[in-house]
Amino acid sequence: MLFKQLLAIAVGLTLATGVIQPPARAQTSDNLPAIDRVDTTSEQSGLPGWIWLFGSGVLLIIFLPKIGWIVGLISVGESEVGIVTKKFSTKNLPPGRLVALNGEAGLQADTLAPGWYFGYFPWQYGVKKEPLVTIPQDEIGLIVASDGGQIPADRILGKRLDCDRFQDARSFLLNGGEKGRQLDILTTGRYRINTAIFEVITSANCHQYGMTPAQMKLQQIDSERVGIVTTLDGKPIEAGEIAGEPIPKHDNYQDAQKFIAAGGRRGLQEQVILSGSWNLNPWFVHVEQIAMTTVPIGHVGVVISYVGASHSDVSGDAFTHGNIVRKGDKGVWVEPIYPGKHPLNKQVMEVQLVPTTNVVLNFTARFTGKHGYDAELQALKLLSHDGFTFEIEVFQIIHIGALDAPKVISRLGSMQNLIDQVLRPIVANYFRNAAQEYTILDFLTARSERQAEAAEHIRQALKQYDVQAVDTLIGMITPPPELMQTLTDRKIAQEQEKTYEVQRIAQVQRQELVRATALAEIQNQVVTAEEGVRIAELEAAAKVKAAEGEAEGIRSIGQAKADAYKAGVDALGEQAYASLQVMQIVGERQVRIVPNVSVTNTAAGGNGLVDALLGMWAQNPGTVPTELPRIAEEPAGALVANGVKPAPIVS
């Protein structure tokens, strides 16, 4: 392309200077053909026309660079910038300046854009062609100016000026640009910059300036993270403060000049950067990424700010245990933050998590809660009224309201301080005092009463600290081994007594069951007997009545007989009347006066008992014993001795 341009220019110059002239028309006869005339002309010039044209082109190619050098011809490409240095001039640079603005000798502020330029004679000018400055995607470029005014003593970076992103060096210098490192940066793109005045630092050459490629990247703030900013330029932070106050309208520190012009402070900043990509000057800000503040479900976050406008207390006269301030002021914020993720600056703020659900604090070494507040709590060692030392486990349930959380933190500083400095002393002191008033058996046998008393006392005590005591529970009680053995024996005896009583009751019930069963089985007999008794009673009553009637009759008969006997006695005399009555009775009853069988004495010649038996047999053969032959042979005394009884004598 450049060759064609040079060739066209060379041909044009040659024609203008008459080096190549068109061939002259020769004088010829009118009747000759035109071709003959052309041939005659060529023969007259001596060389063909194309040779003249070719030779002229070759001469131009050989001598054109020298011609361009002589006339000061400069060509700048589309991706180049021409940096001009003037070798001599009638004017000199002002003292302290390195770049010429008014045609002085030296480095010129103005550059050459792409195109052709005449008059830059080599004996007066030097033109250096540099490629355009390219800032890759997602990167930045830093600038160091080699000329300009001095940066003020309270600043470390040169201020930003309207100089077309350092592409207009003249505007930079005329408008008060300062030499050294610059606040302004170059973002992604291509720039025609006079690199003799402005050094451009990119990821390709950053190692030469003590920087890393990572510093030349866009500042990336990840999701759910915040950037804590420390500025390296600006006014000093006021005495008594730890961070610079927020400055508006500087586009998250991307417009560094607005930050400084608005009075931004050098050092740690209150304002944070949220997630995203930011064009930040690493010479101006340092960014540290931290996670957002997370408040879990069932908690609130009490913010303690170490920066802010004032310390005005809004807690009221009733609360005298610390300052509670409005949101944004220095101190404990009156409004807690609720569950979620919050972009807070943890360098200037502290968040104390306070559970708003019920919290169980275990005064035991056997286990601890997941919250960890009771990790140092142990079972309480107590001395009872009767001199025994024992351990008792206590489980305290507390609750802190969301709006009471700032008061608790303002008073105590943290939840752990609440446990260590308030709850543990209150609970331990109450049970130690109570143990001095009760025996150990009171705790063992009346623990529900002791538990109710403890719950009420602790509830009133914690209320003064804006903490709700939900309940107090007594766990395992560990008495001395010797007392425990005694109690065990006593308990065993009591249980045995209960067992025996139960067995006795069971036996009584069994007896009643047997009795009831027996009664059920003999119920018919009982009814029969009861009815028999009634019948007997009625029969006895009837007999009594009959006997009474019979007695009355006998009494009447006797009385009549007595009257008759008395009349007989009076008539016959007592002896005669008695004999008469005897004979009358013998006759009425047929009494035998003489016996049927008479037994005589054997000494008088009779057979005695044998004769009696024979006589009885004669009257009644069935009454004679079967042993009669033997009886007849033996005497009567022998028969009686042998167990044979004689038949009775019937008279």
Image (tube, helix red, strand yellow):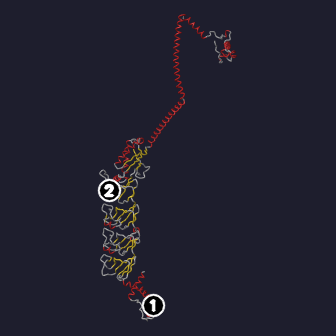
At a point 34% along the width and 62% down the height, the residue shown is 269
Query: Residue 431: x and y, percent?
Result: 38, 45
Q: Quadrant of residue 389?
A: top left
Q: Quadrant of residue 122?
A: bottom left
Secondary structure under tag 2 reads loop
The residue wearing badge 1 is 48
Question: N-terminal of the two: label 2 or label 1?
Answer: 1
The mark lying in front, picked from 2 and 1, is 1
Identify whether 72 is placed above or below 581: below
Q: Pick the residue in front: 516 or 644.
A: 516
The residue wearing badge 2 is 326
Query: Residue 587: x and y, percent?
Result: 60, 9
At a point 35% along the width and 48% down the height, the residue shown is 463
Disc 1 packing (10 Å; few <14; some 14–19; many ≥20): few
Residue 442 in view (yes/no): yes
Secondary structure under tag 1 reads loop
Query: Residue 31: x and y, percent?
Result: 45, 94
Give, as a three-letter code, the residue at label 2: Arg
Query: Residue 295: x and y, percent?
Result: 39, 56
Identify whether 269 is placed above or below 528: below
Q: Pick the residue in front: 520 or 46.
A: 46
